[in-house]
Amino acid sequence: MFIRLAHQYREFVKDLVMNLQALAIVLEKRGYIASCYTCGTELTSASFMVSLGDNHLIRFLVSDYGITWTEMQDDRELMKLEGAEAISQLEELANLVKYQIKSVDSKAPSYDHSLLVH
């Protein structure tokens, strides 16, 4: 049973890493500074980062060891979540990007920072 659960978790991590890579691409196309780095081609871990402007940074880490969402502004940690809560917050970010109205100035994407912080 535990071997099966470990295998399922590894598959889950791979799916999550692929979705993070896609989200980084979409964010970059929308004008945000975003990146998603992985080690190797096995998709066993990733480091996803996006700058939301005004020294507002989100970092999402995923690996066999766990899942972490960290939100920082002006070099101070605003929020740190793990596990399912971290993934829920990632969904919030994806939805904001998905339903965002394009800003007048395409060089500076509009973003309501208060929508992410609970």
Image (cartoon, grey):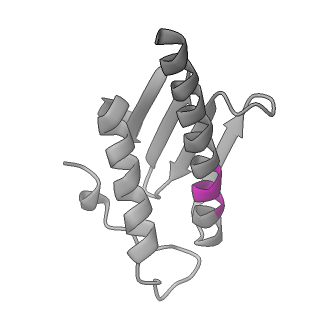
Assign the magenta stretch its main secondary structure: helix
Q: Is residue 6 visible?
A: yes
Q: Is residue 110 above or below residue 101?
A: above
- Name the residue nearer the viewer: 99 or 114: 99
Q: Position of residue 92 (x, y in %)?
A: 34, 56
Picture coordinates of residue 44 (x, y %)? Answer: 66, 27
Percent x, y for residue 26? 60, 65
Q: Is residue 7 above or below residue 42?
A: above
Q: In the image, is residue 23 part of the stretch drawn in magenta? A: yes
Residue 49 in the image: state x and y as whole percent. Answer: 56, 44
Depth order, front residue of 117/26: 26
Q: Is residue 40 above or below residue 103?
A: above
- State the residue at coordinates (45%, 49%): 55
* Between 45 and 13, the one nearer to me in the picture: 13
| Residue 65 visible to the viewer | no
Q: Please, which residue is most extreme toward the left here?
A: 118
Q: Is residue 37 left or right of residue 111?
A: right
Q: Residue at x 63, y 29 (%)?
A: 45
Residue shown at the point (46%, 57%) measured from the top left:
52
Magenta range: 21-25
Residue 103 or 87: which is nearer the viewer?
Answer: 87
Whether residue 94 appears in magenta in the rendering, the answer is no
Q: Residue furthest right?
A: 41
Q: Residue furthest front?
A: 1
